[in-house]
Amino acid sequence: MLAVERRNRILEKLQREKKVIVSELSREFQVSEETIRRDLERLDQDGFAVKSYGGAVLNEKSGLDMPFHVRKKENPEGKRKIAALMEGIIEDGDHIILDPSTTAVSIARALKGKEKLTVITNSLEVMLELSDVPDWNIISSGGSLKEGYLALVGPRAIEGLGAFNVEKAVFSCKGIDMEKGITDGNELFSQAKQTMMKSAKQRILAVDHSKFGKVAFSRICGIHDVDLVVTDEKPSAEWLEVFGKNGICCLYPGE
């Protein structure tokens, strides 16, 4: 097993259990305790964990996004519900932009029955997911690869995303808060999503219920800047009131 794969699996365990113990990880992965300590040191340096005596705990105060392969295992049923709703929103022949979120990958998978879509994205995973779909136009933004995220970012990505005019931009976030707005864990991701929104007639936030009331490091936009929110569970009456006051349609299962 590669070191990066082992660290990702340790992160998954941290996400579930909130703490890990060196001796237990050593037995589980059949490596020395010193190797595990180096893994935990790296996770500590990256901001995902806080080393403690004999192990580590999850850094829940971190504004960082977990790596893609860790995030894609979070709430898969919620992402499936969002993707099913998006299937009814995207029309044959649409030009759309998809962000590099794990939710976008689920959406891309659900859209494969559509005809003649044009998809612009800075997500390597979305491009791979759609690589076998005939008669679609899949366009990469270009840019620099962000380690661990399967996302293209930076000036070239911004330029590529801003070069087109589309009917719909679909993006996710790490937090949506009534006062702080819509936020993400990384400034590079926020900048790319801001450009996606400027390129689209309709701006769609696809976000699961766990992100409501959360605030991440970097602001993408205000709540009033989106046209449609698609989520996996009915939001509270307070949230529905906020959406209504801002002229935002909110779509959820059973709506």
Image (cartoon, rainbow, N blue to C red):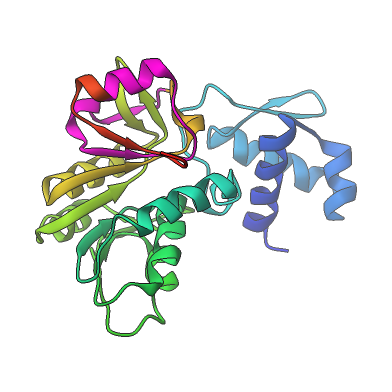
What quarter of the picture does the C terminus occupy? top left
Snapshot quadrant of residue 236: top left
Name the residue rendered at 41%, 58% in the picture: 107
Foreground pick, 99 / 212 = 212
Q: Position of residue 3 (x, y in %)?
A: 67, 56
What residue is shown at x 46% (from left), y 31% (from top)?
234
Q: State the residue in front, 14 or 126.
A: 126
User: Is residue 236 covered in magenta?
Assistant: yes
**Which residue appears at 22% of the width and 57% of the height?**
157
Q: Name the quarter where the N terminus is drawn.
A: bottom right
Q: Which quadrant holds residue 100?
A: bottom left
Q: At 19% across and 41% down in the image, what residue appears?
A: 194
- Residue 104 higher or lower than 18, as above or below: below
Q: Is residue 180 above or below residue 205?
A: above
Q: Is residue 198 above or below residue 220?
A: below
For residue 126, what is the image quadrant?
bottom left
Q: Nearer the viewer, residue 71 or 227?
A: 227
In the displayed orientation, state which residue is furthest to the bottom: 134
The magenta-colored residue range is: 215-243
In this rendering, position of residue 121 left or right of residue 87: left
Work out whether residue 31 can be spotted. no
Left or right: 46 as drawn, with respect to 144: right
**Coordinates of residue 118 in the picture (x, y in percent):** 22, 70
Residue occupying the far front of the picture = 254
Task: Answer whether residue 87 is magenta in the image.
Answer: no
Q: Is residue 117 left or right of residue 31?
A: left
